[in-house]
Image (cartoon, rainbow, N blue to C red):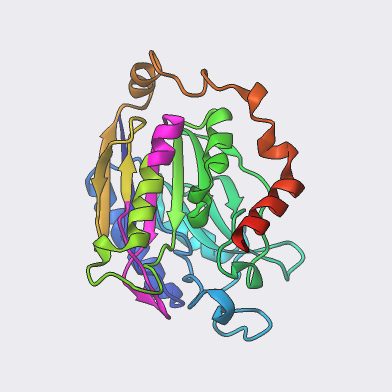
Amino acid sequence: MTIIGSVAANFTRDLEQNYQTIAEYVAQAREQGVDFLVFPEAAIGGYLSSLGNHGDTIKNTQRSLPPAIRLDGPEIARVQSIIGDMLIAIGFCELADDGETRYNAAALLDGTRIYGSYRKVHQPLGENMSYSSGTDYEVFETPIGRVGLQICYDKAFPEAARIMALKGAEVIASLSAWPAARTATAENLQEDRWTYRFNLFDVARALDNQVFWVASNQSETFGSLRYVGNAKIVDPGGNILDSTLLGSGLAIADVDIPGTFRTMRAGMFHLRDRRPDVYGTLTDVDATGAAAWRSLSHA
């Protein structure tokens, strides 16, 4: 059996406070025997303070941007010193080797090893003003099985999770800084339409691909963004095993990864029953497809 944990918590520009929060959740998780713990997007250094045309940009200011971190830098090493032998996924702003390019990134690591990292591919609402975009989805061998990583808006694109499932992912960690709607926000954020979408995507992607889905998220507020929490673990049948709902906290589930896969995929096996021969439109009509939806949106 494998015990999986997912965190909903608030992370800001205060690195020392972030390390303390990480240590607190690692301690809670260790008490409950967690093998794999997923922290939110931008857990080291916080996310952007706003999105859209008024978002943080390198052109506007360097002060409001998250600290740019190298995979081999002291910030990641500090996290490794905290987590010991626990496997975690955690988000941060990655500084590329050129010393200038920034990526919204996540790493999969324990106290002695980095198993892999990911740079966010799909960018919402002007995020490209602050970050460059990644270009691929990899799956990494870890002590708990084959794990894929994605970040926030990626979950709205079925292709992202499907690529990793086809590469053999058993667990997909989806790290987010997912806020409530910016307009007509529900008084109860648990009923907000963006909360609904966040939760719906989590269940759909798990069921689409028959994988364990671990969704973390920021909580509370940062800048102009109000986060919706709802960290959760979803099984390959689309069942939510545990959730933090709106508050900060730790969702935990004890799962049998190989046993569940044998059961779930013994009958209906979505990957086996695919028909790639009729899916050419997904990639073949990129330019004309884009033109078509643009014309429809202006009709």
Q: Residue at x 64, y 86 (%)?
A: 60
Span shown in magenta: 204-231
x, y percent for residue 19: 40, 67
- Relative to 162, is 225 on the left or the right? left
x, y percent for residue 63: 57, 85
Q: Is residue 213 magenta?
A: yes
Relative to 103, residue 275 above or below: above
The answer to whether residue 137 of the structure is visible from this angle is yes
Name the foreground residue: 115 vs 291: 291
How many numbered markers are drawn?
Answer: 0
Q: Is residue 107 magenta?
A: no
Name the foreground residue: 223 vs 190: 190
Q: Residue at x 66, y 58 (%)?
A: 294
x, y percent for residue 258: 38, 22
Q: Residue at x 31, y 48 (%)?
A: 232
- Relative to 151, is 257 on the left or the right? left
Name the foreground residue: 98 vs 235: 235
The answer to whether residue 248 of the structure is visible from this angle is no
x, y percent for residue 217: 38, 59
Q: Residue at x 73, y 41 (%)?
A: 285
